[in-house]
Amino acid sequence: PSAIIIMAHTKVESDISHDPPKASEQPQENGSTIHDDVYSALQVDWRSLKLRDKRNYKDLPNHQFINWSTYFQNKLLTEKSSLLLTRFGREPLHTQAAFASQDPQAFSEAALGVLKNIVEQKAVFYVLIVLDDMLREAEGLASAFSYFLHTNFDPFIVLSNVLEREWGKMTLLDETIDVKDMIPAKACFILCHLLNAGLAPNELAVKKVTATLKRKLDPENKSLMHYSRLACVSVFQSLLRQSGNRLLCYEAGICDIFYPYLEQHDSANSGHQMTYQMLQCIWLLSYSDAVRGYLVDDMQLVKTLAHLMRGKTMEKILRMVFAICINLSADSDFKNRLSMFGVEAALEEMLTYEWMDEEVQEDVNFLKNELAANEVSSSTFDEYCKEVLSSKLDWTPRHKSAAFWEQNTHRFLEKDGFIIKELVNILGRSDASSRELAVAIHDVSELLGRSSATRSKVMETDAKELLMLHLLAEDEEVKTQALQCVQRLMLLG
């Protein structure tokens, strides 16, 4: 199903047919658009109700199922808010936006009062749907919410709390519907409306919203439906449109949530929209001077971008990948790491593609030329890393060169020992050849003996268990290397 799309540029069409940004295009601070297709996923759920003649839940006269005066009597709403919501519910559909625009501050206060103080699902769901529509239709309503920023009714904190609550089934006019995913999705839509209208949350609110969305998007959270995940990512897109939020979001670890989804991307699956939106978030991060250096050093990001380049995925996703790479390509270390993952072959193949947009060809040529120029200055260690990451190890001279190990042992500790972990991963691969296993075991043995720091880093992995398994290998070369490595391990304690 379609889902909310917040674009980092002004041109908006539908679903994934949105054009990704040009490499030279700067993200705008606000003014992005939520297109009408966003609601189709929720409309599927409305069809389960026997209300086919109604546009949606908001169309029902709210006095049929919500008595706002009860909430006033229980001191959950002010009398003014209770009366306003009652009058609003009696307005015909075509005049509701005008009614809300008469006193937008009072209307926003009433809505926030419900979302903050009331836990009954019918009331919360009704207000979320009303707000979603009114923020698109009622002039001046979004800006009225700015009055409550940094107060006990801060809309970002209130909506974040709505997202954190557990929702379930409710009964409406003898129909039972499950709002477990619909309420969070609607709350996300409203957050996007407010952010796109230029409301700027403070640091506390950004951290609160980010932490809440991360919990929702946790890959282990299997119960969340796809459209709700897309809505959560859309809030990140809107947050990152505001440059002041980028470092806060990065430091909160949003990329760590994205990577598991991006690594699972397959050109044959249906997750293109999720991939596209998450990449756009990273693209927005890449415009922050404070974040760019972290992205350059993030081996998981480089590995993920290389995976997408080699995966023959759709053009619009590749354009977003290229846009990120071009933003980071001024750093020679980033280009070295791209080369380590062997993207040159993928770029070479892409030169033969017939792209729908000729500017994609320019992006491919630019990256290919940048990597070629950088190759001239790459070190022997860079070449070694490229060999390990390609999983095509062979007895090239460097593996048995004492000079290579003496000069580069310390570099194996860079990026938290990333290349050591990749080397050990080869030992556990079922598709690794005997030659690759023998070379990898030899190199692990070298790392065990070269320094206490590299030995400790190796022992943090599954190397010991894997080496024991290879003592039983049928291949004599593998068995010999494993025996020598285990003996060294035992001698060193």
Image (cartoon, rainbow, N blue to C red):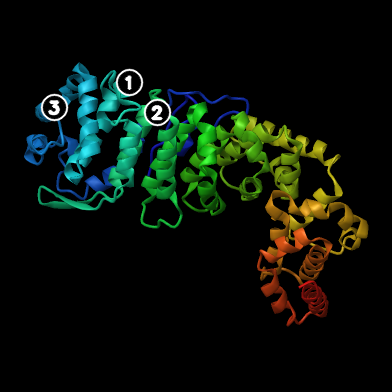
- Gap in Å between the C-alphas at discs 2 and 1? 10 Å
Looking at numbered disc 3 in the image, what kind of residue is underneath it?
Phe
- 31 in relation to 415, above or below: above
Residue 490, disc:
none
Q: Which residue is mark 1?
A: 143
Give the label, 3 or 1, closer to the camera: 1
Above/below status of 99 relative to 228: above
Residue 129 in which image quadrant: top left
Which is nearer the N-term, disc 2 or disc 1? 1
Q: Quadrant of residue 77?
A: top left
Distance (Cα) linking label 3 and label 1: 20 Å
Quarter of the image with the C terminus in it: bottom right
Tell me if I can see residue 354 in this picture. Answer: no
Q: Amino acid at mark 2?
A: Leu
Crowding at dot 1, Cα within 10 Å, few <14 / some 14-19 / many 20+, comes out as some
Res. 195 mark: 2
The amino acid at mark 1 is: Ser
The residue positioned 67% from the left and 39% from the top of the image is 296
Q: Is residue 13 above or below residue 295?
A: above
Q: Is residue 347 left or right of residue 8?
A: right
Mark 2 packing: few (<14 Cα in 10 Å), some, or many (20+)?
many
